[in-house]
């Protein structure tokens, strides 16, 4: 049904734009200058805030100064919330209806976020308003709000929880326009709907926030995992009754401090630490073996917490846990409680092929786990990845899979999605970060949106007249990446498999984009080109191949990275400035360069070039063995 609504909306918008801009017989009319914004006499906080935000944006972008009233009289009205007389009871929080009524338009929403979502949908659909980046804020190319004769849009959020990081998604206006509601990276005022908050640590909370090793390990090592014959302080023993009692007490103490009964949803994370040190004591091992997965102990433990929380009346609290690495496979016997959120993580996946690509062996196991958890869990969330953390400066060619993967999550009953990206982007903004953030946001809002149109619209607005060349570059590199498998920590040389002439074509596309842009848009092109230059510098091709030009090309790249504030090469590593790096492929710029004598310097340079050759040989060998 939602897919049908999205397609229908796309057709309505395409038809209205055709009439506005092509000059066909008009079936749209501009919003009258003497229209009014109507709220009910007893309008709640959310309705009042939505009306005020609509008034502000109509004034700012279209010069319309519409009063907020409780009676429209004979004037054209924009009816907010309960003033519309549309019954929204029973609809999911954030749902809205935009509908033509007698001499007006109804903007009705449900819950805490529905009314403000209706306002932003109205501005986007009929005012052409967009928030592409936080710096630009809301913009439009239209001179007026253009209203079709019959408006009937009924939207229900695809996901109850939508989150990504990057740069612009931290912004409130950006998040409201583009449908982000997670509370990790943004703060949205309560009257504008607020956020869905993890009121505990977002992840890896066991042994850190709950039953912390710093407090208990020395005196009570049996509270912690027995792994490889030794107790370790970085995972818990989940079958130890004392461990459970401590965690339960800490959860309830946390709820007493942080719980908000008026929030639509609050989440507490009971999640394993970020390592493979699961407990192998007799009780944990038996429970895991009985379930065919280490998730057996985890879900059994979390279920107990969840039942206790539900019994205490915390109806709007979800208890979150991971299906991650050693707990990724679903258990065969234990079933998550209704208030348990299973956060399935795709960290092992290939990101150059869709998750359901039958030719991609890398993703088959994940799809099985997704299907299994989808059957077991009533509240399945996804933790997905959109960056190469080993070489963040370089390209991460996932644009060809983003939409289908989001649809797969939705079609497998996921109720929340976190798209982890370059969370340190402000020190490593060198690719298509703003584009990717925007597309992710729109897909979280609607996985069946006009993805191609959204991409093209952003490229044109952000990169200027040469945007089509960049679109061709994205398509070219997506095709080259689809010939191999790309992980979130892929070597640069293994990110693409180019055919003859394709790197030269990519260079030409960047030159065309630069020659067509100027000012701020040229700056955006130059910044994004850094990723392509870094890939060439890592792979040792083009200007980075010839010994006569390679050193100077690397120096220029280093200077430009510094110019654009790129101080981080990959997760956890700052951009080095050691002179020796100018003599080795950029793939190894994060290697330690603390050499001293002449021999050590020569060895550093020669060994890195030899290592690159070894990587090429291995890469080609994998291809020959039908890796593709």
Image: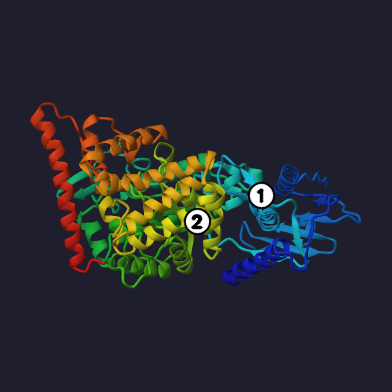
Q: CA distance from mark 2 to mark 1?
A: 20 Å
Q: Is residue 432 above or below residue 399?
A: above
First in sequence: mark 2 vs mark 1: 1
- Which residue is disc 2 drawn over? 468
Identify the secondary structure beneath mark 1: loop
Q: How is the image coloured?
A: rainbow
Q: Position of residue 552 (x, y in %)?
A: 28, 36
Left/right of residue 612 with respect to residue 175 in the rendered view: left
Give the residue drawn at x 87%, y 52%: 71
Quadrant position of residue 100: bottom right
Instruction: Choose between 289 and 419: the one closer to the eye.
Output: 419
Quadrant position of residue 567: top left
Q: Position of residue 611 (x, y in %)?
A: 15, 47
Instruction: Choose between 569 and 210: the one closer to the eye.
Output: 569
Give the number of the disc on residue 285: none
Of all residues, the one furthest to the right in this rendering is 74
Instruction: Using the rendered image of the protein, determine whether residue 314 is visible from the camera's viewpoint.
Output: no
Give the residue drawn at x 70%, y 61%: 21
Q: Position of residue 613 (x, y in %)?
A: 16, 50
- Which residue is disc 1 drawn over? 140
């Amino acid at each position: 049904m939602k897919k049908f609504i999205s397609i229908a909306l796309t057709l309505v918008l395409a038809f209205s734009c055709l009439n506005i801009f092509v000059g066909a017989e008009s079936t749209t009319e501009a919003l009258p200058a003497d229209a009014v914004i109507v709220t009910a006499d007893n309008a709640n906080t959310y309705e009042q805030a939505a009306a005020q935000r609509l008034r502000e944006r109509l004034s700012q972008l279209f010069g319309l100064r519409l009063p907020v009233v409780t009676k429209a009289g004979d004037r054209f009205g924009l009816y907010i919330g309960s003033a519309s007389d549309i019954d929204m009871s029973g609809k999911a929080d954030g749902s809205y209806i935009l509908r033509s009524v007698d001499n007006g338009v109804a903007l009705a929403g449900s819950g805490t976020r529905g009314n403000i979502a209706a306002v932003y949908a109205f501005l986007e659909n009929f005012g052409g308003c967009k928030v592409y980046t936080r710096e630009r804020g809301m913009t439009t190319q239209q001179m007026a709000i253009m209203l079709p004769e019959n408006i009937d849009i009924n939207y229900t959020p695809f996901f109850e929880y939508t989150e990504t990081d990057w740069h612009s998604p931290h912004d409130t206006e950006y998040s409201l326009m583009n449908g982000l509601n997670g509370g990790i990276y943004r703060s949205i005022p309560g009257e504008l709907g607020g956020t869905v908050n993890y009121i505990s640590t977002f992840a890896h909370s066991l042994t850190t926030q709950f039953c912390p090793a710093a407090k208990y390990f020395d005196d009570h090592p049996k509270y912690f995992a027995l792994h490889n014959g030794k107790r370790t302080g970085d995972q818990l023993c989940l079958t130890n009754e004392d461990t459970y009692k401590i965690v339960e007490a800490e959860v309830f103490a946390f709820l007493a401090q942080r719980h908000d009964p008026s929030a639509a949803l609050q989440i507490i994370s009971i999640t394993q630490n970020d390592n493979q040190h699961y407990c192998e004591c007799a009780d944990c091992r038996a429970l895991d073996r009985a379930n065919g997965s280490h998730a057996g102990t985890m879900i059994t433990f979390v279920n107990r917490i969840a039942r206790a929380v539900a019994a205490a009346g915390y109806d709007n609290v979800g208890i979150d846990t991971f299906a991650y690495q050693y707990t990724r496979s679903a258990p065969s016997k234990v079933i998550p409680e209704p208030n348990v959120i299973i956060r399935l993580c795709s960290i092992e996946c290939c990101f150059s092929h869709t998750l359901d690509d039958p030719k991609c062996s890398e993703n088959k196991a994940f799809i099985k786990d997704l299907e299994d958890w989808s059957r077991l869990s009533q509240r399945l969330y996804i933790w997905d990845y959109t960056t190469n953390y080993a070489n963040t400066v370089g390209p991460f060619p996932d644009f060809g899979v983003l939409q289908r993967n989001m649809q797969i999550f939705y079609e497998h009953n996921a109720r929340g999605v976190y798209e982890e990206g370059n969370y340190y982007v402000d020190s490593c903004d060198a690719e298509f970060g703003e584009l990717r953030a925007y597309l992710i946001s729109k897909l979280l809002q609607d996985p069946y949106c006009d993805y191609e149109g959204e991409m093209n619209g952003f490229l044109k607005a952000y990169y200027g007249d040469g945007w089509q060349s960049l679109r061709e570059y994205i398509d070219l590199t997506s095709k080259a990446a689809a010939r191999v498998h790309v992980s979130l920590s892929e070597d640069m040389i293994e990110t693409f498999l180019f055919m003859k002439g394709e790197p030269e074509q990519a260079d030409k596309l960047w030159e065309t984009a630069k020659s067509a842009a100027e000012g701020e848009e040229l700056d955006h092109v130059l910044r994004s080109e850094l990723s392509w230059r870094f890939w060439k510098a890592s792979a040792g091709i083009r200007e980075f191949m010839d010994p006569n030009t390679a050193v100077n090309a690397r120096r220029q790249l280093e200077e430009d990275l510094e110019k654009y504030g790129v101080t981080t090469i990959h997760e956890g590593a700052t951009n080095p400035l050691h002179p020796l790096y100018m003599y080795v492929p950029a793939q190894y710029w994060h290697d330690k360069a603390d050499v001293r004598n002449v021999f050590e310097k020569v060895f550093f340079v020669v060994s890195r070039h030899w290592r690159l050759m070894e990587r090429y040989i291995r890469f080609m060998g994998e291809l020959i063995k039908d890796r593709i």
